[in-house]
């Protein structure tokens, strides 16, 4: 006897007499399937602009016209397997190339991202925290103008040397 499938969306049993849909080897209620697809569509629609920005930034870094298939597969892998957003990937590349001043090689693509993502996340957390702490600070009161008088140099310590004595 076959095991009764459980809908991954609502976590309820799916009966054979109900209308159901198989997706990625999982059985969904038809209503749950439609809801899941709508959520994925909405999620991806919000990410489209960020993905385009990432593609443009990568093209600028490598000075290429189009993203290579290797880099495309790396982006998809990082997005799906590592749960990285397109913004995090772009921030990681910015950190590596602009802040650290290092260059990327086209033959490796963007494989450095998983190795530096924790460092980048920590940096952006620190920046966010510093911004929040300094939000209500008034720096106009902290700065005190100071007048500095510059003295003219005194050249009287030099001796005149007679060249004939030498």
Image: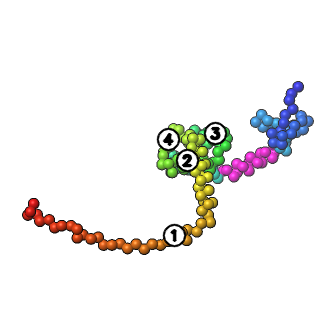
Give the image location of residue 90, x and y in percent: 58, 49
Camera-nearest residue between 130 and 47:
130
Q: Earlier in the sequence, mark 1 or mark 2?
A: 2
Labelled pair 4, 3 in contact (Cβ < 8 Å): no
The residue wearing badge 2 is 93
Residue 20 in the image: x percent, y percent?
Answer: 85, 38
Query: Most prominent secondary structure in the magenta stretch?
Result: helix
Q: Nearer the viewer, mark 2 or mark 4?
A: 2
Q: Nearer the viewer, mark 1 or mark 2?
A: 1
Q: Nearer the viewer, residue 80 or 19?
A: 80
Q: Position of residue 125 (x, y in %)?
A: 61, 52
Q: Residue furthest top?
A: 1
- Spatial CA distance of label 2 from label 4 is 12 Å
Question: For the view shown, which residue lies furthest in the right direction?
Answer: 17
Which badge, 2 or 3, is on the more N-terminal residue?
A: 3
Callouts 2 and 3 close, C-beta under 8 Å: no
Task: Give the Cα distance between marks 2 and 3.
Answer: 16 Å
Q: Is residue 128 above or below residue 156?
A: above
Please give the range of residues in magenta: 33-48
Instruction: Return the disc, 1 or 3, that comes first in the chain's sequence.
Output: 3
Q: What kind of element bears circle 3?
A: helix
The secondary element bearing badge 4 is classed as loop
> Which is more N-terminal, label 3 or label 4?
3
Q: Which residue is mark 3?
A: 77
Identify the residue under disc 4: 105
- In the image, residue 14 above or below residue 60: above
To which residue does mark 1 refer? 143
- Give how far apart the Cα atoms at labels 1 and 4 are: 46 Å
Q: Secondary structure at mark 1?
A: loop
């Amino acid at each position: 006897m076959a095991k009764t499938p459980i809908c991954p969306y609502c976590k309820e049993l799916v009966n054979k007499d109900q209308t159901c849909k198989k997706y990625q080897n999982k059985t969904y209620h038809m209503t749950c399937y439609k809801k899941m697809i709508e959520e994925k569509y909405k999620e991806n629609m919000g990410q489209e602009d960020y993905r385009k920005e990432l593609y443009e930034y990568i093209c600028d870094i490598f000075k290429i016209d189009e993203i290579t298939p290797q880099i495309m597969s790396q982006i998809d892998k990082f997005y799906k397997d590592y749960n990285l957003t397109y913004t995090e990937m772009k921030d990681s590349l910015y950190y590596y190339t602009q802040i650290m001043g290092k260059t990327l090689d086209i033959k490796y693509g963007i494989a450095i991202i998983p190795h530096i993502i924790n460092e980048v996340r920590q940096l952006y957390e620190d920046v966010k925290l510093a911004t929040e702490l300094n939000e209500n600070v008034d720096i106009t009161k902290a700065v005190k103008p100071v007048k500095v008088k510059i003295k003219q140099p005194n050249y009287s310590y030099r001796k005149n040397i007679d060249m004939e004595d030498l």
